[in-house]
Image (tube, rainbow, N blue to C red):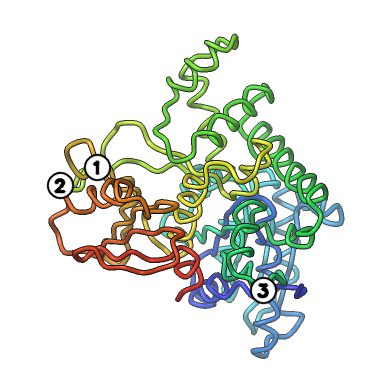
């Protein structure tokens, strides 16, 4: 395995905003590669002629920087190291660990020739004081675990189908690829990520205290990937299982899980009426390997797993995503929008059965506009169904 896999798409996004008067905020679930991204970007800066003294790097999870958890000391640490006649690039990792960090960041933003990059593992940081103080002065880059293309660089499995099934079952947290041949170590590593995220980014950050409840809700979401979910449905299920819980409480915990980037919520959209619907949304896990660890299983409900993978890939490619209501009770898995253009995606493990093919094509066929429509499957062939392009999932993920 290579020491580092170049996360080119994310590096390029950072490079676009280099030396612009805007704060670069990299967010994402723990261990998805945010710290390494900074290391790779710093290497790129140095290759471009930036000197060591122009770079300030602070990791607020490192005990060596524990004093900087005080925002005043963090501010002073950066201030005294700034250069007056050159650009200074400051990188602060896991910024949310510093109490009132937004006060330090908003003050540093006012300094000349200071290029600021920060990371965080909780979306709450972008909905509180930072957003209030820095409206329109920051951009967010939502980072995910390895894409299949990146995963293919990291492992040595030559057969692409075998490689894909390992990607699907074991997931793609960057460091976990080192344990691809050791399922026990791999599971322990993912469990560590999950528990740390729950304790630090869900429980402590949101002031919650019922770890058993949050694990039950996470398990419910993991087992219902691709199915309509509501706080009431979860509360009713927990109550019927002997754990009385109200919808408001569940809703709070759902927000905490999505704020920690463990799960993503996708809302419904009426394609014909062109309006967003308030009905039940769907949830997708940040990584299928993590989902399998939560459930204690692999090779289960492949259709839902590949739907999860397609959703994450569309996110990586910069799409805004909704679930599509196409009429007469039918549904399109994903309505994906980017650059004022729309694409429709239906996902199925296989459509070799004629009835399955008919069922999957029907929602797309009811859409009367001329935007591209795709049916993504694991079947080893491509086809055209009256303008609906059937493509192989592994080829699509590989950019073929």
Q: Give residue 325's mark.
A: 1
Q: Residue at 57% across / 55% down in the picture?
A: 27
Image coordinates for residue 284, horizontal then vertical, percent: 49, 44
Question: Which sits earlier in the primary sequence, circle 3 or circle 2?
Answer: 3
Q: Residues within 10 Å of mark 1 (few under 14, many from 20)?
A: many
> Contact, CB < 8 Å: mark 1 with mark 2?
yes
Mark 1: which secondary structure? strand
Q: Residue at 55% across / 70% down in the picture?
A: 10
Taking the image as shown, residue 135 lies to the left or right of residue 341, namely: right
Image coordinates for residue 276, horizontal then vertical, percent: 25, 41
Q: Nearer the viewer, residue 20 or 377?
A: 377
The quarter of the picture where the C terminus appears is bottom left
Taking the image as shown, residue 319 lies to the left or right of residue 187, namely: left
Q: Residue furthest front?
A: 353
Mark 1 and mark 2: Cα distance apart in space? 8 Å
Find disc 2 in the rendering and name its residue: 272
């Amino acid at each position: 395995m290579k020491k580092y896999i170049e996360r080119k798409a994310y590096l390029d996004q950072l490079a676009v905003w280099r030396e612009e008067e805007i704060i670069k905020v990299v967010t994402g679930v723990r261990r998805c590669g945010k710290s390494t991204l900074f290391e790779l970007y710093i290497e790129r800066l140095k290759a471009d002629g930036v000197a060591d003294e122009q770079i300030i790097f602070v990791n607020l999870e490192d005990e060596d920087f524990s004093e900087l958890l005080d925002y005043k000391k963090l501010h002073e640490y950066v201030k005294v190291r700034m250069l007056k006649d050159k650009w200074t690039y400051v990188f602060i990792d896991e910024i949310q660990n510093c109490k009132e960090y937004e006060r330090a960041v908003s003050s540093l933003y006012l300094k000349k020739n200071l290029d600021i990059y920060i990371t965080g593992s909780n979306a709450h940081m972008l909905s509180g004081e930072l957003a209030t103080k820095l409206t329109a002065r920051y951009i967010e880059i939502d980072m995910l675990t390895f894409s299949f293309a990146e995963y293919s660089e990291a492992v040595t499995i030559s057969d692409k189908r075998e490689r894909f099934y390992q990607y699907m079952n074991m997931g793609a947290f960057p460091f976990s690829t080192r344990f691809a041949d050791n399922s026990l170590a791999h599971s322990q590593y993912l469990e560590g990520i999950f528990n740390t995220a729950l304790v630090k980014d869900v429980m402590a950050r949101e002031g919650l205290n019922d770890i058993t409840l949050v694990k039950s809700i996470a398990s419910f979401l993991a087992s219902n990937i691709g199915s309509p979910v509501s706080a009431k449905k979860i509360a009713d299920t927990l109550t019927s299982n002997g754990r009385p819980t109200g919808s408001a409480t569940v809703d709070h915990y759902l927000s905490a899980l999505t704020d920690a980037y463990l799960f993503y919520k996708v809302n419904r959209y009426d394609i014909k009426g062109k309006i967003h619907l308030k009905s039940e949304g769907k949830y997708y896990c940040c990584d299928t390997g993590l989902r399998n660890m939560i459930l204690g299983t692999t090779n289960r409900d492949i259709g839902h797993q590949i739907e999860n993978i397609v959703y994450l890939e569309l996110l990586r490619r910069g799409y805004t995503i909704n679930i599509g209501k196409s009429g007469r009770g039918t549904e399109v898995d994903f309505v994906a929008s980017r650059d004022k253009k729309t694409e429709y995606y239906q996902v199925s493990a296989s459509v070799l059965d004629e009835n399955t093919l008919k069922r999957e094509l029907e929602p797309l066929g009811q859409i009367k506009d001329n935007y591209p429509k795709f049916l993504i499957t694991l079947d080893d062939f491509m086809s055209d169904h009256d303008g609906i392009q059937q493509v192989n999932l592994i080829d699509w993920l590989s950019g073929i």
